Image (cartoon, helix red, strand yellow):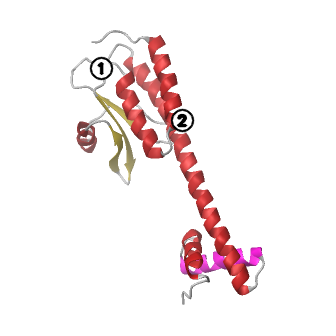
Amino acid sequence: MSEPVDWRELAKGLAEMARDLLAQDSVQGTLDRIVVAAVDLVDGCDAAGILAVRDGRVHTLASTDDVVRASDELRASFRLYTHENKNLGALDLYSSRPGAFAEGFEHVGWLLASHAAVALASARLQANLHEALKSRQVIGAATGIVMARYGLSEREAFNRIVTVSQNSNIKVRDLAREINNTGGIPDLS
């Protein structure tokens, strides 16, 4: 087994990781940096990956090595990363050598996973807010077009878009894009 964990160095590394994760500009960038940090921070760790289960299948979201993807597909992994309120996935740590992980590595993995969960949840929230803002702008533009084209108030125009969306089983955002491209509500009959 490796040397015991140097908690002071780990704390410094976790602080640096937290700042690095905050600086990422996408969910994928955050995921990619988490797995790199895991290999850097966990003594004995040769590779790391983040996986999620969707529709009963394991999907690798980020990895440092092809071995991680192969292992995840076989579902042979050491899972550390979950969030109490929402399962965000798992951080898997791999070593090619038996007994390579340092004494206390479970605590290191838990600390790393906790930081990673916060960073990933934040990155996803930011991405969702960005997408919502883009949708709001598209819907706002479409509402303005419908107001001008059909002589409606803002509320009436928005309600017309929502009604057409519901009756045609098209997302409001997608209908709004169509309105913006064509200049009017499409004939969906």
Amino acid at dot 1: Gly
**Who's the residue at 32% across and 9% down the image?**
3
Looking at the picture, how far across and down is residue 23, in whole percent? 52, 36
Q: Nearer the viewer, mark 2 or mark 1?
A: 2
Residue 45 drawn at (x, y percent): 31, 24
Snapshot quadrant of residue 43: top left
View extreme (bottom): residue? 189
Tally the marks.
2
Q: CA distance from mark 2 to mark 1?
A: 26 Å
Mark 1 surroundings: few (<14), some (14-19) or many (≥20) residues within 10 A: many
Disc 2 crowd rating (10 Å Cα; few below 14, some 14-19, many 20+) is some
In the image, taking residue 152 as reference, residue 104 lies left or right, namely left
Answer whether residue 159 is visible to the viewer in this image: no
In the image, residue 138 lies at what x, y percent?
Answer: 61, 67
Q: Secondary structure at mark 2?
A: helix
Residue 177 versus residue 23 in the image, above or below = below
Q: From what the image shows, is residue 135 above or below residue 147? A: above
Quadrant in which the C terminus appears: bottom right
Q: Is residue 68 magenta?
A: no
Q: Main secondary structure of the magenta part?
A: helix
Q: Position of residue 180 (x, y in %)?
A: 59, 76
**Element at label 1:** loop
Residue closer to the observer: 43 or 149? 149
Which of the two discs, 2 and 1, labels the residue nearer the N terminus?
2
48 in relation to 55, above or below: above
Task: Give, as a single range, the part of the protein colored magenta.
Answer: 154-169
Q: Which numbered marker is on residue 22?
A: 2
Query: Residue reaching furthest right?
Result: 153
The residue pinned by badge 1 equals: 44
